[in-house]
Image: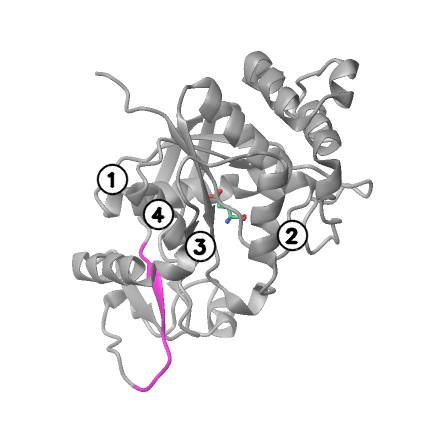
C-alpha cells in the first residue's frame, strides 16, 4: 500500500505570543514535513475567546513569518469552523458516541467521576437546563506507536474520562476541533509537545467514531524553564524577540539535539533553515527535556 503524501501542521492556541517552547514545536513539525518532502500548514486554534488576548493571533503569525516558517496554504482559523464542529457533534450524538451532560464539575467529583444524572443514557434533551456535550469513550487498553517515543500504552476509561467536546458556555473544545480539522486537512503526521501525549488515545477514539484513520504521532519533549516548569503563558514564558529570529532558530535546533555548528549562529534565517532541513535527525532529539 502506498502512503499518502506527508501533510503536517503547527496548531497553536493563541493564548499569548509565541515563546521558545512553541517555536521548538513549530520547527520540529516544519522540519519533519520538509524532510519528508511533505506539506506543512499552520492552524490557529482560537476556540476560547475568554483565554485569548485579541492581539495574540497576529503576534503568532508575525513570529512565524519572521522565522521564515512559511506554510503551504493560507492559515486556517478554528473560529471560522463552527459549522464543521456542529456537524461532527450531530453525527456523534446520532451514533450514540456523544451525549448531553448537565452534571457540574462538583457533582462529578463527589461521585468519583460517575454521572449522578446518568447523562450517558442519552435522556437529557435540549431544554432550559444548560448542558455540555461529552464524547462517550469506550473502555480500552490503547497500544500505539509514537514516532519518537516508541510503543505507548494508555488506559482509556469510559464515563470517568469522557472529554467535553462542547462546553456549557457554548465553546467547542480542543479535543473535538483538533480531530475534525486534522481529518479535514488530511493531516498524516502530528508533531507536537509531549504535554499532549495523554490526550492521544482519546483522540484516536474520536477519529474512529468520525470514520477516519488516525495519523502518525510524534511527541517532542516540552521545554522547561530554570525552575523545571513547562514554558507556557501560565509560567510567564517570555515572548520571542522576532528581531533575533536567527538566534532563536539556532537555539531551537540545539534544544532539539541537532548540534548545529557554531558558525551557523551568525548566518541569516534562510541559511539556518536550509542547514536544518539538510541535517535533520529525528533520533537526535533528547528524550528528556532540559
Ligand atoms: N492547540 C494545541 C496547543 O496549542 C495544540 C494542538 C495539537 O498540536 O494537537 O496546545
Q: Residue at x 52, y 43 (%)?
A: 196
**Coloration of the structure image:** one colour
Image location of residue 114, percent across then percent down: 41, 64
Tell me which segment is drawn in magenta: 128-136
| Mark 4 or mark 2, earlier in chain | 2
Q: Which mark is residue 174?
A: 3
Q: Report which residue position mark 2 lands on.
A: 17
Count residues near mark 1 (Cα–Cα under 10 Å), then give few for <14, some for 14-19, many for 20+. Answer: some
Mark nearer the viewer, 4 or 2: 2
> Which one is nearer the viewer's eye here, 229 or 103?
229
Q: Is residue 144 left or right of residue 2?
A: right
Q: Is mark 3 within 8 Å of ligand 1?
A: yes
Image location of residue 277, percent across then percent down: 55, 18
Distance from disc 1 to disc 2, alpha carbons, whole Å, reads 33 Å
Figure check: 144 above or below 96? above
Q: Report which residue position mark 1 lands on.
A: 212
Q: Which mark is residue 181?
A: 4
Amino acid at each position: 500500500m502506498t502512503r499518502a503524501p506527508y501533510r503536517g501542521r503547527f496548531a497553536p492556541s493563541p493564548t499569548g505570543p509565541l515563546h521558545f517552547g512553541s517555536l521548538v514545536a513549530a520547527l520540529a513539525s516544519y522540519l519533519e514535513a520538509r524532510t519528508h518532502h511533505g506539506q506543512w500548514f499552520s492552524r490557529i486554534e482560537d476556540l476560547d475567546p475568554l483565554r485569548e488576548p485579541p492581539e495574540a493571533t497576529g503576534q503568532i503569525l508575525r513570529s512565524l513569518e519572521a522565522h521564515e516558517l512559511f506554510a503551504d496554504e493560507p492559515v486556517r482559523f478554528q473560529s471560522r469552523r463552527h459549522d464543521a464542529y456542529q456537524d461532527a457533534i450531530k453525527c456523534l450524538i446520532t451514533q450514540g458516541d456523544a451525549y448531553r451532560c448537565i452534571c457540574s464539575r462538583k457533582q462529578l467529583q463527589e461521585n468519583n467521576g460517575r454521572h449522578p444524572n446518568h447523562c450517558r443514557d442519552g435522556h437529557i434533551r435540549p431544554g432550559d437546563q444548560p448542558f455540555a456535550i461529552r464524547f462517550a469513550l469506550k473502555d480500552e487498553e490503547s497500544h500505539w506507536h509514537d514516532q519518537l517515543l516508541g510503543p505507548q500504552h494508555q488506559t482509556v476509561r469510559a464515563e470517568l474520562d469522557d472529554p467535553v467536546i462542547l462546553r456549557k458556555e457554548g465553546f467547542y473544545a480542543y479535543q473535538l476541533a483538533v480531530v475534525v480539522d486534522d481529518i479535514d486537512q488530511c493531516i498524516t503526521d502530528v508533531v507536537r509537545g509531549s504535554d499532549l501525549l495523554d490526550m492521544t488515545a482519546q483522540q484516536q477514539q474520536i477519529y474512529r467514531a468520525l470514520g477516519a484513520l488516525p495519523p502518525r504521532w510524534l511527541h517532542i519533549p516540552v521545554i522547561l524553564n530554570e525552575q523545571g516548569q513547562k514554558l507556557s503563558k501560565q509560567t510567564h514564558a517570555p515572548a520571542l524577540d522576532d528581531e533575533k529570529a536567527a538566534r532563536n532558530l539556532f537555539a531551537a535546533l540545539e534544544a532539539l539535539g541537532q548540534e548545529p555548528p557554531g558558525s551557523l549562529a551568525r548566518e541569516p534565517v534562510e541559511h539556518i533553515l536550509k542547514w536544518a532541513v539538510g541535517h535533520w535527525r529525528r533520533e537526535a532529539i533528547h528524550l528528556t527535556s532540559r
